[in-house]
């Protein structure tokens, strides 16, 4: 972490230096990193001039890891240790994925249906989170080299239709890579920002985002720097990969060859991808290959045949599109433009189907591979505090409804899909039996009515309910979903005030201990003095708090009563002197105390800025 | 209803939050503009590098603004909320008693929906949706009169319950269409 600069007390407390922040598009097939420099967003390239980093990770001997083109080149010769499309495994169990065409050695244990997919490599067992972390590390390194400094943080994009488990897994991967996540941003929203700002457009737009492994469709209202998502829908297991697989199956069928070994499978899948890309600009593609058995494959795939093979996949994207329109209460006549995002939207049959559905030519004037990363970079720049005119505002939604299990295996929805974030909702439940003292709460995500058809997010128990007649206890469960789309749940028995607080760690996620172990083992210097680390971290935290409070005081000290102001200054002075010392625990406590003593101040500042926003008048100044 | 406390949410109605007078006939354009202004000032994106106390406050205010916006934007919710401010709970979930003519109307709608569902007739469902929306609009006109002009709250409660019922049926129809469409 970079050392923070501290100004003389009384002088400008918030140094206006440019903070290094990036946007990362962590894609199924390719990943990118972008940043904003001198007001312009641009994708950062590697030493060879490549903007894209293939999302391929190869585990070699002695713990060495290859990421990107090198790894991609080895996928046919070392398929079991070369992981592609790891994003498809994020937050998913073995039971949920199609393993038939995968060359990996999946770890199967009695409990593996309840755990995230794990792959046995020559470097040991790896989860999708660890594999994704390697990609993120590589992009982080590229960014730090290119920008010449440590990153303050990153905005990482996720498919809008990612559920809680997949989002949490992405955040865990970033943490493993040593990235400070400023925000998880939905891919179509990021693309809308890049497109909208670049073209200066206003109105209602559809973002049609078909990536390597995921499909999202979002409808946004763009108006004076506010990007309001009206609805989103999609399929988190549908993408360009599936088009490759259709070609792959056709090749097997045509050539009548025996079941392929893993190396040949990879080889033909690669050929299939090349044929798909070729057919974007050509009428026919030649697929030729010599298998390890000596069999020769030599086929011609016409664009017409390719369209036929993939027709059902194309249709699969239109159903979510219809749903999104319905949820937004709109018809195609309300749509001003359809922005195409993701490499797979280069396929002519996709463009035709979209044009046909919306009765207008889709917008393809910006590079569909880069829009998401560019938009993420713009948001990262704003969040890091680099942009002085805070005009950009993204109002996003939760893609899937959240609910609780009730009697009979039914799901009671608590937060409906497409609710604007952040959101909190409370729901009251009661006991079923006389004298019941515990209640288990099962949180689910999805649109279906039966528990078995929804995704289980977490189960927890509320104990110590006083024995009462059935139906008289009042248990209030509050769901809070933050701006990252991540959920926390708390439950309280209203007559006794017994509370259970739960951080929803999805059943499929990693536990806090697992992450800590991974983090520790990833530090090269394993013997880093824990205490020195703790002290350094406490000091950094204290310093940034002191800076923030000094800045707040300079702006708004008029809002405080003399006694409030005195209390804050006393805490501030105490923290300032402690932070020069060596006692990390004392610094930490003083930091918490200072945070606590500023609560009223924070409330007053918020009230003032809200009424200022509404009336254009500055309440703080009016009071003087 | 709100899980929030202190500051803005204390003793302030949703209308006051948006600087609007409490009436059914609401200036929706102004509601939207003011909602966006409040989000611009309070959204967590503005406080990524701020004090912990400010982050919490931002989360609470932005959440409240979303809750309030949804409650006022939807006519049925708005009517229910206005009546709640007057100390009247509409309680549409438990009290389902309706006038006889509306009950008849309900049964006709339900039958028509079932028929269309059985015959997988999406056009018929769309037509029913349009009919319900027409009915909703006329109820809204009635509510402007009952709440804002005549201040006849008992009749307003009846009209609000009808509107809530229609909302629910529209949701059901949309679900059926979605199901048939897939």
Image (cartoon, coloured by chain):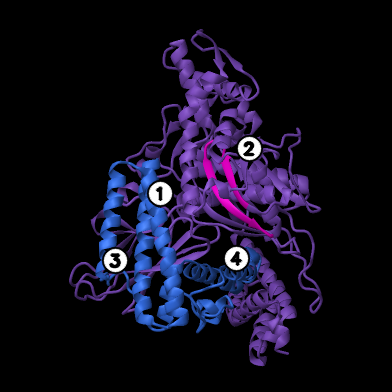
Chain colours: A purple, B blue
Mark 1 closeness class: few <14, some 14–19, many ≥20 residues within 10 Å: some
Inter-mark Cα distance, 3 to 4: 45 Å
Numbered disc in front, either 3 or 2? 3
Q: Disc 2 is attached to a residue of which chain? A: A
Total numbered labels placed on residues in the image: 4
Q: Which residue is mark 3?
A: B102
Q: Which residue is mark 1?
A: B126
Mark 2 closeness class: few <14, some 14–19, many ≥20 residues within 10 Å: some
Numbered disc in front, either 3 or 4? 3
Inter-mark Cα distance, 1 to 3: 21 Å
* CB within 8 Å, label 3 to label 4: no
- State whether residue A351 is above or below residue A590: above
Q: Is residue A362 left or right of residue A405?
A: right
In this picture, which residue range is highlighted in magenta? A204-224
Q: Disc 3 is attached to a residue of which chain? A: B
Task: Indicate the secondary structure of the residue bearing disc 3.
Answer: helix
Residue A212 included in the magenta stretch of the image: yes
In what quadrant of the picture does the N terminus of chain A appear? bottom right
Task: Indicate the secondary structure of the residue bearing disc 4.
Answer: helix
Q: Disc 4 is attached to a residue of which chain? A: B
Are the residues under badges 2 and 1 in a single subunit?
A: no
The tag on residue A361 is: 2
Q: Position of residue A423 (x, y in %)?
A: 49, 65
Residue A278 included in the magenta stretch of the image: no
Inter-mark Cα distance, 3 to 2: 46 Å
Q: Disc 1 is attached to a residue of which chain? A: B
Q: Earlier in the sequence, mark 1 or mark 3?
A: 3
* Residue closest to the far bottom: A562
* CB within 8 Å, label 2 to label 1: no
Residue B37: which quarter of the image? bottom right
Residue at left 37%, top 36%?
A108
Q: Which residue is mark 4?
A: B44
């Amino acid at each position: 972490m970079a050392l923070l600069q501290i100004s003389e007390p009384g002088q400008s407390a918030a140094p206006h230096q440019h903070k290094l922040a990036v946007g990362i598009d962590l894609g199924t097939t390719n990943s990118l990193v972008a940043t904003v420099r001198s007001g312009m967003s641009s994708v950062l390239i590697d030493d060879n001039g490549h903007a894209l980093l293939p999302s391929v990770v190869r585990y070699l001997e002695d713990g060495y890891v290859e990421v990107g083109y090198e790894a991609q080149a080895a996928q046919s010769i070392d398929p079991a240790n070369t992981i592609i499309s790891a994003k498809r495994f994020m937050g998913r169990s073995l039971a949920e994925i199609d393993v038939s065409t995968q060359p990996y050695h999946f770890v199967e244990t009695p409990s593996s249906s309840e755990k995230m997919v794990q792959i046995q490599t020559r470097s040991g067992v790896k989860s999708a989170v660890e594999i994704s972390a390697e990609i993120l590390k590589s992009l982080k390194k590229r960014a730090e080299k290119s920008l010449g400094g440590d990153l303050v943080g990153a905005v990482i994009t996720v498919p809008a239709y990612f559920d809680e488990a997949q989002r949490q897994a992405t955040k865990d991967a970033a943490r493993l890579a040593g990235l400070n996540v400023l925000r998880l941003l939905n891919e179509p929203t990021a693309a809308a920002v890049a497109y909208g700002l670049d073209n200066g457009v206003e109105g209602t737009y559809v973002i049609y985002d078909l990536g390597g492994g995921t499909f999202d469709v979002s409808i946004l209202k763009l108006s004076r720097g506010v990007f309001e998502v009206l609805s989103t829908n999609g399929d988190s297991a549908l993408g360009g990969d599936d088009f490759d697989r259709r070609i792959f199956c056709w090749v097997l069928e045509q050539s009548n060859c025996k079941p392929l070994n893993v190396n040949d499978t990879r080889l033909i899948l690669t050929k299939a991808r090349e044929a798909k890309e070729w057919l974007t600009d050509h009428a026919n593609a030649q697929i030729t290959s010599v298998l390890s058995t000596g069999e020769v494959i030599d086929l011609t795939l016409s664009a017409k045949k390719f369209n036929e093979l993939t027709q059902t996949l194309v249709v699969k994207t239109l159903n979510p599109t219809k749903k999104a329109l319905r949820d937004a209460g709109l018809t195609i006549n309300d749509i001003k433009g359809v922005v195409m995002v993701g490499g797979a939207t280069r396929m002519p049959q996709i463009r035709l189907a979209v044009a046909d559905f919306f009765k207008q030519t889709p917008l393809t004037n910006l590079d569909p591979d880069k829009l998401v990363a560019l938009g993420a970079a713009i948001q990262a720049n704003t969040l890091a505090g680099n942009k002085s005119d805070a005009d950009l505002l993204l109002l996003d939604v939760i893609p899937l409804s959240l609910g609780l299990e009730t009697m009979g295996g039914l799901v009671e929805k608590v937060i409906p899909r497409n609710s604007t974030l952040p959101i909190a909702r409370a729901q009251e439940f009661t006991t079923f039996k006389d004298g019941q003292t515990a209640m288990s709460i099962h949180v689910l995500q999805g649109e279906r009515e039966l528990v078995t058809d929804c995704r289980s997010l977490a189960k927890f128990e509320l104990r110590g309910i006083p024995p009462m007649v059935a139906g008289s206890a009042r248990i209030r469960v509050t769901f809070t979903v933050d701006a990252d789309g991540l959920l926390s749940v708390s439950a309280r028995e209203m007559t006794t005030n017994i509370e259970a607080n739960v951080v929803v760690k999805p059943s499929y996620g990693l536990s806090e201990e697992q992450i800590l172990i991974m983090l520790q083992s990833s530090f090269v210097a394993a013997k880093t003095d824990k205490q020195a680390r703790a002290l350094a971290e406490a000091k950094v935290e204290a310093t940034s708090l002191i800076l923030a409070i000094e800045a707040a005081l300079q702006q708004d000290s008029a809002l405080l009563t003399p006694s409030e102001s005195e209390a804050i200054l006393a805490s501030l002075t105490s923290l300032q002197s402690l932070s020069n010392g060596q006692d990390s625990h004392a610094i930490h406590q003083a930091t918490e105390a200072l945070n606590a003593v500023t609560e009223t101040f924070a409330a007053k500042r918020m009230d003032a800025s809200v009424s200022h926003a509404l009336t254009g008048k500055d309440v703080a100044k009016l009071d003087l | 209803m709100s899980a929030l406390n202190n500051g803005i949410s204390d003793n302030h109605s949703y209308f006051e939050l948006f600087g609007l007078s409490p009436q059914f006939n609401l200036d929706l354009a102004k509601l939207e503009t003011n909602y966006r202004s409040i989000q611009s000032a309070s959204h967590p994106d503005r406080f990524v590098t701020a004090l912990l106390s400010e982050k919490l406050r931002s989360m609470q205010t932005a959440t409240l603004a979303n809750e309030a916006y949804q409650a006022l934007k939807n006519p049925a919710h708005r009517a229910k909320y206005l009546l709640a401010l007057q100390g009247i709970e509409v309680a549409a979930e438990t009290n389902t008693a309706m006038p006889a003519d509306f009950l008849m109307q309900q049964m006709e709608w339900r039958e028509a929906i079932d028929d269309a569902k059985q015959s997988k007739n999406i056009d018929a469902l769309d037509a029913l949706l349009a009919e319900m929306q027409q009915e909703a609009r006329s109820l809204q006109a009635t509510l402007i009169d009952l709440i804002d002009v005549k201040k006849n709250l008992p009749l307003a409660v009846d009209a609000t319950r009808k509107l809530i019922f229609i909302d629910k049926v529209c949701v059901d129809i949309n679900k059926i269409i979605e199901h048939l469409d897939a």
